[in-house]
Amino acid sequence: MKIAIIGVTGRAGSRIAAEALRRGHSVTGFVRSPEKADVPEGVTVHKTDATQPEQLTPCLRGHDAVISAATFQVLKAAPLLQAVKASGVKRLLVVGGAASLEVAPGTLLLDSPTFPDAYKVEAVPGKQFLDDLRSETELDWTFLSPPAMFTPGERTGKFRVGQDQLLSDDSGQSRISMEDYAVAMLDELEHPQHVRQRFTVAY
């Protein structure tokens, strides 16, 4: 497949790109400053501002899927959806956040009393992004939320899959490596199981 990745220089985006290349896909990354881009070898890098649909739309044309790994503080749903739809690409996958997952029926992690205020600057727009996606009926979108701990680590290819609830292991840890998250993202792209849905993965 020809895959367009927005936010390809980020920690999650670069690992998703590496996993896509590992599987033989063609990867194009879109960044504001190509001269500063540090991406896996094999990624074709183009300069564009993803917050500007008129810039992003022509860049996305001809791709089989778009993966957004941009931060929610920077890239909102509306301009991204506008650009993807105008480009003719039908498949959109989004690197989500854990804050919009439920920790109890009807209670989001974001709303729990122990959720750090410092994280809300990204978590609140992340929840809004998911809310906006849920009203989108034209694109085949998927929003993949990581668990609470989401850090670089080992690629094992082994993890559990959930839907809207925060997953934790027997010791109470809610975690996955960015490498295994990338495996889950590419699995979903190659074999769609959660079209127009949010899902999550964790050990």
Image (cartoon, rainbow, N blue to C red):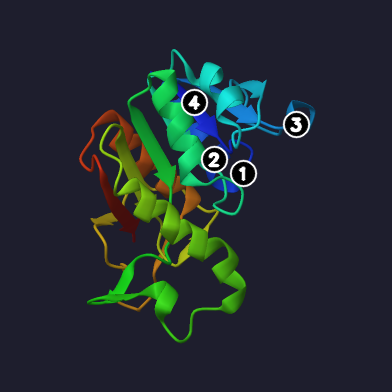
Q: Residue tagged by mark 2?
A: 13
Q: Is residue 157 above or below residue 159?
A: above
Rounded to the nearest angstrom, the CA distance separating label 1 from label 3 is: 13 Å
- Which one is closest to the eye, mark 2 or mark 3? 3
Q: Residue tagged by mark 1?
A: 10
Q: Residue tagged by mark 3?
A: 33
Taking the image as shown, residue 8 lies to the left or right of residue 174, namely right
- The earlier-in-sequence mark between 2 and 4 is 4
* Towards the viewer: 105 or 200: 105
The type of residue carrying mark 4 is Ala
Label 2 crowding class (10 Å Cα cut-off): few <14, some 14-19, many 20+?
A: many
Q: Position of residue 5 (x, y in %)?
A: 52, 31
Q: Residue at x 59, y 54 (%)?
A: 73
Rounded to the nearest angstrom, the CA distance separating label 1 from label 2 is: 5 Å
Q: Position of residue 54 (x, y in %)?
A: 58, 24
Give the quarter of the image for residue 31: top right
Q: Is residue 192 above or below residue 124?
A: above
- Residue 23 shows up from this direction: no
Q: Residue tagged by mark 4?
A: 4
Locate the N terminus by quadrant. Answer: top left
The type of residue carrying mark 2 is Gly
SS label for mark 3 = loop
- Which one is closest to the eye, mark 1 or mark 3? 3
- The earlier-in-sequence mark between 3 and 4 is 4
* Towards the viewer: 15 or 4: 4
